[in-house]
Image: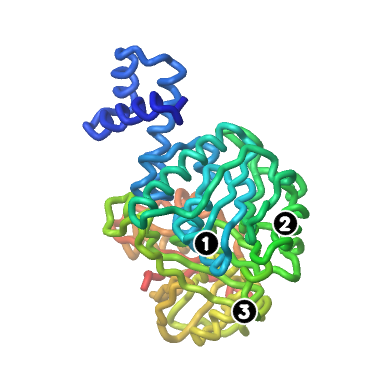
Amino acid sequence: MLTSRRGAELLASAAALREAGDSLDSVGRHLRRDGVAPDELAAALTVTGLREKAAAKFGPRAGEMLFTQAGLEQASRCSVAELHARRFHGATAVADLGCGLGAESLAFLRAGLGVRAVELDPLTADFAAHNVSVEAAWIEACHGSAPPHEVIIGDATELGAGAADAVFLDPARRTAGHRDTRRLASSDDYSPSLTFAFDAARSVRFGGVKLGPGLDRELIPDDAEAQWVSVDGQVVEMGLWFGDAARQGIRRSAAVLRGDPGRAAAAGGAAVTGSTPVWHELSAAADFPDADTRELGEYLIEPDGAVIRARLIGKLAAELDAGMIHDGIAYLTADNATATPFGQVFRILEELPAREKDLKRALAARGIGRLEIKKRGVDVDPAALRTRLRLTGSGAATLILSRSANRHIALLAERC
């Protein structure tokens, strides 16, 4: 219904009421008085709420798109989808197999690539077709024409890539449904299977597979480039790239984005749709050996999660002239503060007693009432510890709990 003219008018009415300051409940009461049927009203209110949430991923044009709860949760951010699209430079068309709501397809269109999108779920496919048509109309308005595109309802394992010379797959890693889905425990249950996804990605000139960042590293194929992606400190995915989508001499990489333009625009910042996100990348031909351990310096560096997952901590350490504080613990220490997009740098103010009773006394003496607790290599629940410390002062600080030279350490620090 929402893809019809009637649905568009209903959503426009809901949006106008929201812009006038009405709550979703008030919008519902208003439309109910206008005689909107209960099922239509429920669908319209759901999409209206999801459009507002989607602005953080899709920017201002989210207000024209259609979403399901599950589809929005699983969709790539606009900035990450554009990072994917860059991999297909030189391709003509991309088969987006298992396209979901079409986030990747939109980025492929913006990159000038033809799109053959395939989605098994009929409702999701209808919403994807609507979203692709919205993007194509915008491209046509700006450039006079849009690349060829289609959204097909069907099984990706049966329909395949068609005539496309590139394939992108995002295997379903959650149970089927439009809301309240749960994460699948085993990669054996992904749909389509990893075997199909890898074979499909190898069957064309350019191939890409989007997976969760925690995928068992034993499952990473030797012929793929593995890239972990982090947005504003959150590791959001691991991409596997095949054929010409992979780069010569690179098998491990960490791509880091700070200050996501889509999020900034959604929050009222200066970034706008179409702005180019600035990605930073650390890469190597293989897992990089960890750095040697050393005594604590004046600064501590917490590597970004993508760097940790890509096992490039040692390379970051070399760039920062830093060492590990302890074998197997992903904290680095250095004598100088070097700004880096690949981690957070802290200046160590002092070392406090690690014993909880003494730590509590030391923090109280310093007037610390607001405490950020970070930890690695120690069995501590930061939330529970914060409660037990019962801090009441007016000051704020960061407490870093870890191990160094086979002893527990508690470091009072500040962000650089």
Give coordinates of residue 139: x percent, y percent: 39, 53
Q: Residue at x 41, y 49 (%)?
A: 58
Q: Residue at x 64, y 79 (%)?
A: 248
Q: Quadrant of residue 350?
A: bottom left
Q: Residue at x 38, y 75 (%)?
A: 349
Q: Looking at the image, tell me whether mark 1 or mark 3 is earlier in sequence order.
A: 1
Quadrant containing the C terminus is: bottom left
- Relative to the observer, which residue lies in front, 44 or 409? 44
As measured in the structure, the alpha-carbon distance from the residue carrying label 1 to the one carrying label 2 is 17 Å
Q: Hey, which residue is sitting farthest front in the picture?
A: 144
Q: Residue at x 66, y 81 (%)?
A: 289
Query: Is residue 68 something that shows in the picture?
Result: yes
- Side of 317 where 195 appears, left or right: right
Q: Secondary structure at mark 3?
A: strand
> Disc 3 designates what residue?
284
> Disc 1 designates what residue?
85
Give above or below for 221 relative to 287. above
> Disc 2 designates what residue?
200
Query: Are there few (<14), some (14-19), or many (20+) residues within 10 Å of tag 3?
Result: some
Give above or below for 135 relative to 207. above
| Mark 1 residue type | Ala
- Side of 332 where 232 appears, left or right: left
As measured in the structure, the alpha-carbon distance from the residue carrying label 1 to the one carrying label 3 is 22 Å
- Side of 278 where 379 appears, left or right: right
| Mark 2 residue type | Ala
- Relative to the observer, which residue lies in front, 353 or 85? 85
Q: Secondary structure at mark 2?
A: helix
Give coordinates of residue 91: x percent, y percent: 58, 65
